[in-house]
Image (cartoon, rainbow, N blue to C red):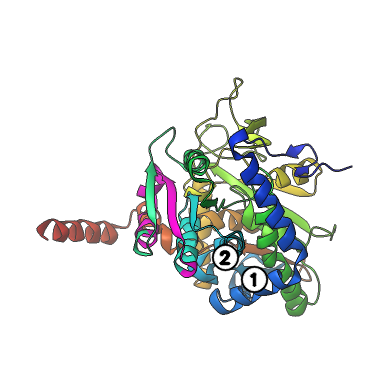
Amino acid sequence: MKKKGYYGHWGGAFVPEVLFETFKELNVFFEEVKKDSSFWHEYLQLMSSYSCRPTPLTYAENLSKHFAGGHIYIKREDLNHTGAHKANNVMGQGLLVKRMGKKRVIAETGAGQHGVATATMAAKFGFDCTIYMGEEDVQRQRPNVFWMEKMGATVVPVTDGSKTLKDAINEAFRDWVTNMDSTHYVLGTVCGPHPFPEMVAWFQSIIGIEAREQILQAFGKLPDRVYACVGGGSNAMGIFQGFLQDEQVGLVGVEAGGKGLSTGEHAARLAGSDASPGVAQGYKTMFLQDSDGQMLDTHSVAAGLDYIGVSPILSDLWEKGRVRFAAATDSEVMEALDLTMKKEGIIPALESAHGFVQAFKEASDLGRDEALIINMSGRGDKDIFTIANAYGDPSWKEFIIERAEQYKKG
């Protein structure tokens, strides 16, 4: 018999005793809304009227011709409100918070998209909002920090540890322990203690539900493969769920290869050899850790992919061989981003571009009667500083220097 909250032997809910009743309450409400068809209907209505769903499935005609293989389709989560798939989960949890009667939400964020989505949801529903973000990510994703603050959220830079996503998660849990009666933690990915992996996957399944229907309508049959970047894994689980039961459809998760798997400066858990099973941050999965269980530093050009763990659901699917994993290096990501912009006029987020890398490597292997889908989890405008720096664009540097001088002068 399957144990609740486990996927194979991964998952669970390893929480401090002080949070036991809070998780018990969350589980009760989540089980209720899952059984309530009116809740899912309310969710779909909200996402339709407020968040532009369904997002389109775009045929990438120029890229398809370029690789002279299968047909390339792109699921456009960048066109979701706030520019990424994150709104799917956040708006769903917002409706749940309303049912629970709580007035404050907290969240962690790496790339900033989850933070922006949470601040947006809090503004719409009238919740107080605090966002925890690693100090390094605050610097990398300053435009997103600006919008979070303008929507009324308090953004707290986390200076502990590596000053990235894992440290932001730790700080959010500390806050929740102190304020659990009034506060809900809007965890942003399919990680953490049960019921968060299941809950986030449930809300994100809207991506796969749409994509499956759209590819059948556009192409007349299922795709040969589906690609998605993987940090914690929410956008990947979102689209994969539309095809999990179709064994003929290959599912490919692409992690951050950083500066190369041999350098140690990466965030590849399931595509590399540096990860091992462990329990941290309330659940069991594959973590990048040393022999003493201490978490390793990670690196990625994409702020949203440098997490030390991965969804327990994906660990189970990887172990069963249902999802294949690969890693894309920073340099490969920039090349794929450049090609996509110039061929299609589409600007993927740096996170999303990881999925494009592997799809491009394998596109020519497909026949002309086959197709693949890339889940474009977000748009790249949030990454303009990182991308411009990677290009070494002289006019951009000149603009930044001139604008800084203007600010100094007041």
Marks 1 & 2, CB-CB < 8 Å contact: yes
Q: Nearer the viewer, residue 12 or 345?
A: 12
x, y (%) of residue 351? Answer: 53, 54
The residue where tag 2 is placed is 91
**Which residue is found at the position 47% from the left and 63% from the top?**
122
Judge left or right: residue 249 versus residue 361.
right
Assign the magenta stretch its main secondary structure: helix
Residue 124 can be seen in this image: yes
In screen coordinates, is 47 left or right of 36?
A: left
Of label 1 and label 2, which has the lower sequence position?
1
Residue at numbered disc 1: 43
Image quadrant holding the C terminus, namely bottom left
Query: What crowding class fits label 2: few (fewer than 14 Cα within 10 Å), some (14-19), or many (20 or more)?
Result: many
Q: On screen, 181 above or below 211?
A: above
Among the 4 quarters of the image, the one containing residue 59: bottom right
Which amino acid does the dot numbered 1 rest on?
A: Tyr
Q: Residue 346's spot in the image, x, y percent?
A: 51, 70
Type of amino acid at the residue the image marks with label 2: Met
Question: Which residues fall within the magenta stretch?
Answer: 124-148
Name the side, left or right, on which 191 lies relative to 173: right
Residue 64, percent across and down? 64, 69
Please tell me which residue is depicted at 80% across the width and 60% down the height of the picture.
249
SS at mark 2 in the image? helix
Residue 143 magenta? yes
Q: Residues within 10 Å of mark 1 (few under 14, many from 20)?
A: some
The reply to whether residue 302 is in sight is: no
**Magenta includes 246?**
no
The residue at 66%/68% (across/down) is 72
* Number of the label disc, if any, that sits on residue 281: none
State which quarter of the image contains the N terminus: top right
